[in-house]
Amino acid sequence: MILTDIIALAKAGYSPKDIKDLIALAEPTPQAPGAQDPEPEPEPEKKPEPETPSIEDPTKEIPAIDEKSNVINYEEKVKELEAKIAELQKENTSKDISGNETKSDDDFLADLVRKYM
């Protein structure tokens, strides 16, 4: 298992313990003491793989985050959202939820005439 496989598994949500178990399963098991060792196969010559740019470089350091500015930004957002919630709550308290539709005078008069006829 190569490093890119391990990174792909980590991104897929595998825990470090799961990855270690998979690596242990992938390793060849030692043979019994009485068994003959098969002749080692000659390894084919490795061709240099073309270098592909990776999306994330694990050796790259993460830039320092200015926590004070983030906190200030979040505090401002919280205040804005609290103000918006208060405004929406005021609108909801004065909203008519009875389900009765108010009719205009013309509609009321038209209904009255229909009922009379």
Image: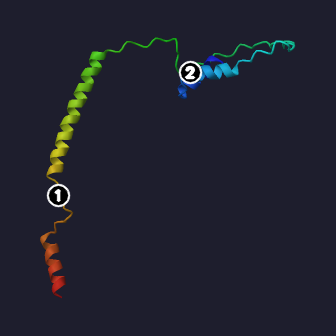
Q: Amino acid at mark 1?
A: Asp
Q: Residue 107 in the image: state x and y as whole percent.
A: 17, 73
Q: Residue 89 in the image: state x and y as whole percent.
A: 18, 45
Q: CA distance from mark 1 to mark 2?
A: 58 Å
Q: Which residue is mark 2?
A: 17
Of tags 1 and 2, the one toward the viewer is: 2
Q: Is residue 114 left or right of residue 37?
A: left
Q: Residue 55 in the image: state x and y as whole percent.
A: 53, 21
Comparing 9 with 71, the one in front is: 9
Q: Quadrant of the N terminus?
A: top right
The local crowd at label 2, few if under 14, some if 14 to 19, many if 20 or more residues have their Cα within 10 Å, is few
Q: Is residue 88 left or right of residue 18?
A: left
Q: For the point 74% across and 14% down, which residue is it? A: 47
Q: Which residue is mark 1?
A: 96
Q: For the point 65% across and 18% down, which residue is it? A: 2
| Outermost residue to the bottom | 117
Q: Residue 94 in the image: state x and y as whole percent.
A: 14, 52
